Image (cartoon, grey):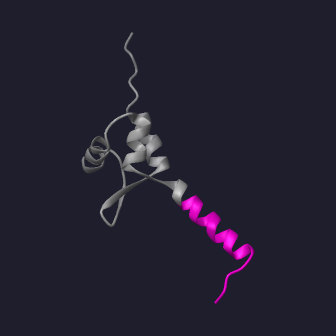
Amino acid sequence: MKITGNGVKKMKKQQTEEQERFMTTDECAKILHCHAGNIRKAIKEGKLPAIMVKRAFLVERADFENYIKSLRVIPSA
């Protein structure tokens, strides 16, 4: 079976969308300016949802954004 033209473009687009949907612990740590170990700790404590693929955690971008919002501190008056 040979995929040509639009089929290849659709496959590449789908792969790119999947890659953008998930983030590694290193990518999360880079955004928060911390160590990847801190991200793994948050995952293990249940504060940040993730899936494990082989031996690596992957975090959905939406879950990461919600986690960042949960870290927000509101100063008291």
Residue visible at 38% across and 33% down in the picture:
33
Where residue 38 sits in the image (x, y, percent)? 28, 41
Where residue 22 sits in the image (x, y, percent)? 47, 55
Furthest-right residue in this view: 5
Residue visible at 72% across and 79% down in the picture:
4
Q: Is residue 7 above or below residue 25?
A: below
Determine the main secondary structure of the stretch shown in magenta. helix
* Image side of residue 20 versus residue 42, left or right: right
Magenta residue span: 1-18
Residue visible at 57% across and 65% down in the picture:
15
- Residue 27 is a magenta residue: no
The number of callouts visible is 0
Where residue 29 sits in the image (x, y, percent)? 38, 41
Q: Is residue 69 above or below residue 73?
A: below
The N terminus, quarter of image = bottom right
Which of the pair 42/35 is nearer the observer? 35
- Image quadrant where residue 66 sits: top left
Residue visible at 43% across and 46% down in the picture:
27
Furthest-top residue in this view: 77
